[in-house]
Amino acid sequence: MLLNPKKNMNGEQLIQGSVEAMDPFDHPVPGQSLTDEPGKWAFEKPPQITDADDAVAFVVQRVEENPEVKQEFLKQMLSGMPIESIVNTISLSGFAEGMWSPDIAEMIKIPIAGYFVAVAEDNNIEAVLFNNLEDDGMTDETLLNNMEQRNPQAFNAMVASLQAPNGEEIQQDVDQGGFLNVSSDEVMLDEEGLI
């Protein structure tokens, strides 16, 4: 453990949020959750609603009775927030608050999603139903732009490491071979024992 957590072993200042600034001992001790008082959390007690139909009616009633809440959901759907995300948040928060069990949380998702689709149609909002699972993640360009803005020290170090001593950029040849880049003809010949 470091005596001065703001400096690393070389005496350099640590960047807040960096991997080096994390304390490896800042975690619960194994078994610590077993020493907590039982029933401390709402989800450790019996649920308040035990019927899926009652849970759906409860959510719909809460949204309909509070125009500000309904307006917030309409704004989220108008901005393109998927209904799946809204419903997942509602079902999880209801479980965390001890309103219903995890089973009820899963069973109410489809009826609540149907309710939000109907609300979106009533308000002429083109609703996005599902999260985009086809997202390929962050592109290299986005990563570099974010790194340059939010972590310029690491960005500059990376740029410096990619330049040769004479100032030219280093070109890295990437081997595109491997077992995944084998043509289907080669696979068939290999299976037949001809290669």
Image: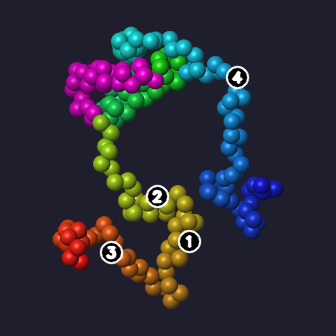
Residue at the far front: name it: 193
Q: Mark 1 points at which residue?
A: 157
Q: Which of 185 and 195 is in front in this view?
A: 195
Res. 79 mark: none
Q: Which of 110 and 183 is in front in this view?
A: 183
- Residue 96 spot, x, y in % from top left: 52, 24
Res. 146 mark: 2
**149 is within the stretch colored magenta:** no
Q: Is residue 12 left or right of residue 130?
A: right
Query: Between disc 4 and disc 1, whose residue precedes?
Result: 4
Q: Nearer the viewer, mark 4 or mark 1?
A: 4
Segment tinted magenta in the rendering = 102-129
Q: How far apart are marks 4 and 3 (CA)?
A: 57 Å
Within 10 Å of disc 4 (Cα), the crowding (few <14, some 14-19, many 20+) is few
What element does badge 3 sit on? Answer: loop
Q: Mark 3 points at which residue?
A: 177
